[in-house]
Amino acid sequence: MTVTNPPLASSADDFVVAIPARYASSRLPGKPLRPIGGVPMVLRVARQALAAGAREVWVATDDARIATALQDSGVQVAMTSDDHVSGSDRIAECARIAGWSEETVVVNLQGDEPFAPPAGIRAVASALVASGADMATLATPLADAEQLFDPNLVKLVRRLDGDALYFSRAPLPWPRDAFAQARQALPAGGHWLRHIGIYAYRAGFLQRFSAMPPGVLEQIESLEQLRVLEAGYRIQVGLTPEAFPPGVDTPEDLERAESHVRAGVAA
C-alpha cells in the first residue's frame, strides 16, 4: 500500500510561526532560558523558525525573563496568561494579540525543539494549504519495534489521502500474525509512523480548537490532537522531509543537545 503526500503549495510560503514558551517546567525548570551552546533554547527555536522563512515569528510566554532574552532577535513576543492548560491555548491568545486574520496559516512550533529543521517547518504549512484540511502535522517512519512499543512516542495511522485516522501511545497498527510469532522486529513491508509534534492551522480554526472542550479520547491518551478527530475535523499528516532531532525535556536531553552543538551535529 502506497501513501502519497500532497504536493507543496506555493501559497504556503506565507505563514507565521508561534512558539509557546512557558517558564515553569516540572522536569526542567526555566527550560526556555536554558543555554545550549551559550544561546537560550527559546532563541534557538526562534532562529529555526526565522530560517524557515516565516513572515512573522512570535513567542507566546508568561514570563518577562523570556521576553528579555528575545530582545533584538527579530522575534515578537506576546505576554500571555500564566494559567493556560496547553500550548495551543497559549498561541490562541497570541493570535488574538497579534491580530492575525482567520485565514492566516499558523505553525505551532514547540519551544523545546531547538533543532527543528526549517524544511520541516515549511512542510507542515504546505501540508495544510495543499490538503485544505483543518489542521496539519508531520510524521516519520518508525525505526524499530522498540519505538513501536514506547508509550512516550506517539504512533499514528492515516488514510490514503494522508488524513489522520488515529493517534495513540499504544502500538499502532498491530501486525497480528507477525507479532503472534515474535515482537522483536517490525515485519517487512509495513507502514508504521511516529508522530512529530508540530502543527499548522488557520488562525480561525485555532480559536475554535482552543474553545472546544477536551474530548474523551484526548483525556484517555493525553493527546490533544485527538480532540480534533473526535469532533469530526480533518488532520492532514505529511512525512517530514528531514529528521527532527529529539526535543529537550529533561536535564539529560539538555546535556545531549549541548554535546550535539559542540560536535557540530546541530547548530
Image (tube, grey):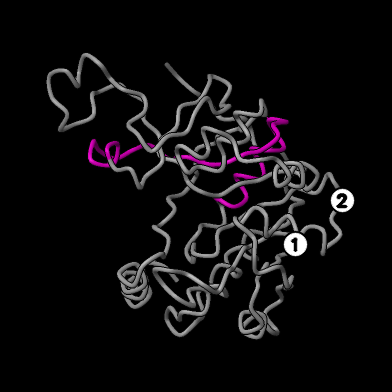
Secondary element at tag 2: loop
**Which mark is drawn over residue 6?**
none
| Above or below 89: residue 115 | below
Residue 252 in picture, x, y percent from top left:
30, 69
Residue 9 in picture, x, y percent from top left:
71, 38
Residue 237 in picture, x, y percent from top left:
55, 34
Q: Amino acid at mark 1?
A: Cys
Are the residues tagged 1 and 2 within 8 Å (C-beta)?
no
Residue placed at 36% from the left, 76% from the top? 258
Q: Residue furthest left?
A: 181
Instruction: Kindly identify which residue carries mark 1.
Output: 94
Instruction: Kindly identify which residue carries mark 2.
Output: 101
Please state if 33 lies on the left or on the right of 140 as rendered: right
Residue 28: quadrant of the picture: bottom left
Residue range of the region highlighted in magenta in the rendering: 120-149
Q: Amino acid at mark 2?
A: Ser
Secondary element at tag 1: helix
